[in-house]
């Protein structure tokens, strides 16, 4: 009992409780001095309250930092688990700066995000604005510490309802039918336009007046040659023969006229 390097932590609680109930506590108190921890060094064991004899002077988080990824519409619970020998008071600071404490009912009653009995934070029906850092602050008689929970929203996977999926599936299944019907009508319209254009062309072509000048008649005159004979030399040859026949016929006509007159 005397001159020992006492470690005044949670393991001395039973001893101090016995000393409080023993009539010899005054005799032992002056010689029982704390060697550790540092906040109790050189103090008499009887001068340290039993509540301060802790193995963990301040709350210790099991996980000081954690990232949670979720989707819009889900329910999320953020833990605030600490190890402490003393009673711990917990509260949360959410991304917009609001402090949520279980003991202040007026703050939590009308707010969507609430702190549960074990200190965890419930975020129902997660929204985009809920993304950010959430700090859980835990404190006891020895001190205060905090842990961070980062909430991220997964926007790559869209939250689609069953009705929406059914509508999309129906649209996909009817798309080929609609495209076929549209192509059918477009084909009919295109064919109709082609027929109209063809009939219009034939109408104007027939209604065009035919040329009746001498050149056309001369070009269409049959000089006694075969229709397949289209060379320029042959055509010129037949033209010269026709002209010669015409001149010979004129001379005979004049001679006949002279004979009748004489």
Image (spheres, grey):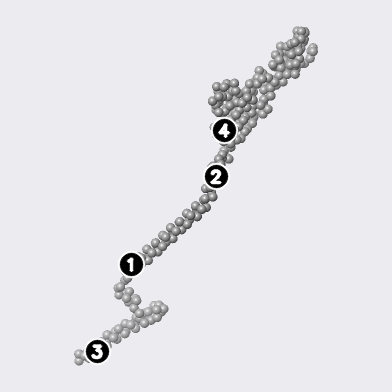
**Which quarter of the image is occupied by the N terminus?**
top right
Q: Is 106 placed above or below 157 here?
A: above
* Numbered disc 2: secondary structure: helix
Closer to the chain start, of discs 3 and 1, is 1
Query: What is the secondary structure assignment of the residue under circle 3?
Result: helix
Q: Mark 1 against mark 4, which lies toward the viewer?
A: 4
Return the x and y of residue 5 as percentages of the image width and height.
Answer: 77, 16
Q: At which x and y percent is residue 167? A: 53, 45
For disc 2, the marked residue is 166
User: Which residue corresponds to mark 4?
Assistant: 125
Mark 3 is surrounded, within 10 Å at the Cα level, by few (under 14), some (14 to 19) or many (20 or more) other residues, namely: few
Q: Is residue 33 in view from this perspective?
A: no
Q: Nearer the viewer, mark 4 or mark 3?
A: 4
Comparing marks 3 and 1, which lies closer to the viewer?
1
Left or right? Give the position of 22 relative to 170: right
Residue at the spot 69% in from the left edge and 16% down from the top edge: 51
In terms of depth relative to the viewer, which is nearer, 92 or 252?
92
* Residue labelled with disc 3: 256
Q: Secondary structure at mark 4?
A: loop
The residue singled out by tag 1 in the image is 207
Mark 1 → mark 4, Cα distance in angstroms: 80 Å
- Crowd around label 2: few <14 · some 14–19 · many ≥20 (10 Å): few
């Amino acid at each position: 009992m005397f001159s020992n390097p006492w470690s005044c932590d949670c393991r001395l609680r039973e001893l101090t409780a016995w000393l409080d109930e023993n009539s010899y506590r005054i005799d032992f108190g002056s010689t029982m001095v704390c060697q550790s921890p540092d906040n109790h060094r050189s103090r008499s064991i009887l001068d340290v309250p039993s509540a301060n004899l802790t193995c963990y002077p301040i709350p210790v988080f099991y996980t000081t930092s954690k990232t949670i990824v979720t989707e819009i519409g889900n329910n999320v619970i953020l833990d605030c688990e600490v190890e402490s020998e003393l009673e711990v008071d917990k509260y949360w600071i959410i991304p917009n700066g609001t402090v949520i404490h279980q003991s202040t009912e007026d703050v939590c009653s009308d707010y969507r995000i609430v702190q549960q009995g074990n200190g965890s934070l419930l975020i129902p029906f997660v929204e985009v604005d809920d993304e950010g850092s959430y700090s859980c602050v835990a404190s006891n008689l020895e001190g205060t510490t905090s842990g961070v929970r980062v909430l991220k929203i997964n926007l790559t996977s869209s939250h689609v309802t069953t009705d929406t999926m059914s509508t999309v599936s129906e649209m996909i299944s009817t798309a080929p039918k609609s495209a076929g019907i549209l192509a059918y009508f477009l084909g009919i319209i295109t064919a109709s336009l082609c027929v109209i254009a063809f009939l219009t062309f034939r109408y104007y072509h027939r209604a065009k007046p035919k040329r009746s000048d001498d050149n056309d008649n001369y070009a269409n005159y049959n000089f006694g040659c075969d229709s397949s004979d289209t060379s320029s030399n042959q055509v010129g040859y037949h033209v010269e023969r026709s002209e010669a026949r015409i001149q010979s016929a004129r001379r005979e006509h004049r001679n006949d006229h002279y004979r009748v007159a004489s």
